Amino acid sequence: MKLFYWSKILYLVSFLAPTFAGVFAGGLSPQVPHRLIHQFPVMTWLQSVYVRSNGDILTSTASPDASVYYVSGVVTGEPVVSLLHRFEGLNVTTAMVEYEPDVYIVIAGQQSTIGRGINGTFGMWQLDFRPTVQTNPGSPNITELVHFTEGGLCSGFDRLPHAPHILLVSDTTIGGVWRVDLRSRQLDLAIEDIHMRPLPWALTQAGITNLHIRNGYIYFTNSYEATVYRLAITEDGYAAHDGDSEVVKKVRSLFVDNFDFGPRGGDTIWAASHANNQLLAITSDGEDTVVLGTPNEMTLAGPVATMFGRLDNDTDTLYVVTDGGLLTAVNGTTVEGGKIVAVDTRPFFKSLLSDASELEDL
Ligand SMILES: *[C@@H]1O[C@H](CO)[C@@H](O)[C@H](O)[C@H]1NC(C)=O
Ligand SMILES: *[C@@H]1O[C@H](CO)[C@@H](O)[C@H](O)[C@H]1NC(C)=O
Ligand SMILES: *[C@@H]1O[C@H](CO)[C@@H](O)[C@H](O)[C@H]1NC(C)=O
Ligand SMILES: *[C@@H]1O[C@H](CO)[C@@H](O)[C@H](O)[C@H]1NC(C)=O
Ligand SMILES: *[C@@H]1O[C@H](CO)[C@@H](O)[C@H](O)[C@H]1NC(C)=O
């Protein structure tokens, strides 16, 4: 099966990697409290996670098909999972947002093998549940809002704070950012930067992956470089004058996938290392810490994306979705179903505080 081709190569790389000093951040077995919310069948690769303001979670898949699932009852401990939509004829979904109450925007397209998008097949779809919002899960009215005819694998997006109908969309194949106006349904390749480009040695043509707009910058990952960059943008979503990207942090990992800031909008970056089976926290002073998982454990087998809870009682909870080890099987052999894991981030900040007080004691 083609899928495991990558898996083998990445596993070989990860096997060799510890011989190069400092590649792995995780020698110890870091553990913060965490609990399983739901696990899908084997071969399910969860690609994105979106937490609604009511605590429910949406997650979407890159294998075995392009589906969006709805998870209610996340905080009650009795989650109920239902299929919201399966895109017929497509086989990967990448990013998701609730655009208006009960209206979701999802990027979906086709890939030849996982992570290798087929050029010209990606689109931004609207799933509008308003007509049937009373029924659970309801049947959405589905419209393709824009099609990336000239694009490759579109992997992430964020909304402009001052014009939330405008989205910046990362195109990992091209190595650039599309600016999409959902009102006019116009798009243009607004930002290109050398660090967004795919690396020549990478296993797939993949550069910029995830992006977040924050304080006048886009923060983005170049996954194979394991680096978070930022680039200054204008209020209307173009690169600011003479703006080259700058390194926020290069982490000791083989790969870095999607991330979130938080908790409660804070500056710490919570990144899914994917191939390393670890969750990383990068604080604003540039320190990176493995918060959960080690390369040879199933705790977070192939973490792909993260998002913080939004209810009063789960704002410290980071929801992490996994591919179950489909990218890099744990120890080269073990896979499981992709899962949603709730991670309690409070001990991490407590440990930072105790470090600080130790310093004061000296
Ligand atoms: C995804 O669908 C396309 C178009 O049908 C097909 O060529 C491709 O092999 C599929 N990819 C996977 C991983 O099944
Ligand atoms: C579905 O969406 C389309 C496009 O936005 C709209 O024209 C149509 O009226 C909607 N149908 C329903 C049942 O709401
Ligand atoms: C897809 O598009 C990218 C960027 O334009 C290009 O480099 C690549 O060769 C294309 N892939 C295929 C299979 O045509
Ligand atoms: C991977 O191998 C290590 C070392 O042999 C072992 O301790 C660990 O339990 C293995 N992990 C899994 C998921 O089998
Ligand atoms: C958290 O808040 C939600 C919504 O207000 C509530 O349904 C849930 O029971 C709360 N959970 C706990 C553990 O207090």
Image: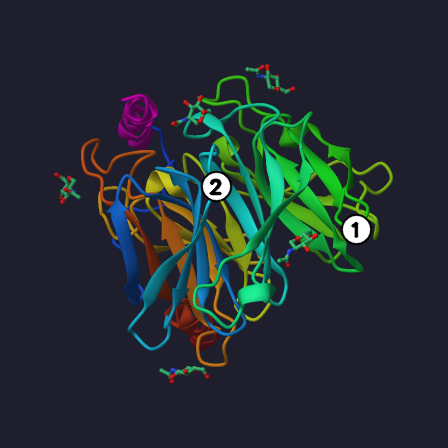
**Residues at marks 1 and 2, CA–CA distance in whole angstroms:** 23 Å
Q: Dividing the picture into quarters, in which one does residue 285 lie?
A: bottom right
| Image quarter of the N terminus | top left
| Mark 1 residue CB less than 8 A from any atom of ligand 2 | no
Q: Which mark is residue 87?
A: 2
Give the residue drawn at x 46%, y 37%. 88
Give the residue drawn at x 62%, y 68%. 101
Judge left or right: residue 169 versus residue 237: left
Amino acid at the residue labelled 1:
Arg
Residue 150: x and y, percent? 69, 25
Q: Which stretch did the figure color magenta?
A: 1-19
Give the residue drawn at x 50%, y 30%. 110
Judge left or right: residue 298 versus residue 188: left
Front in this rendered view, residue 19 or 197: 197
Relative to 191, does residue 86 appear above or below in the rendering?
A: below
Relative to 163, does residue 180 appear above or below in the rendering?
A: above
Q: Residues within 10 Å of mark 2 (few under 14, many from 20)?
A: some
Task: Mark yes or no: residue 266 visible.
Answer: no
Give the residue drawn at x 34%, y 61%. 81
Q: Predominant secondary structure in magenta?
A: helix
SS at mark 1?
loop
Amino acid at the residue labelled 2:
Phe
Question: Residue at label 1?
Answer: 183
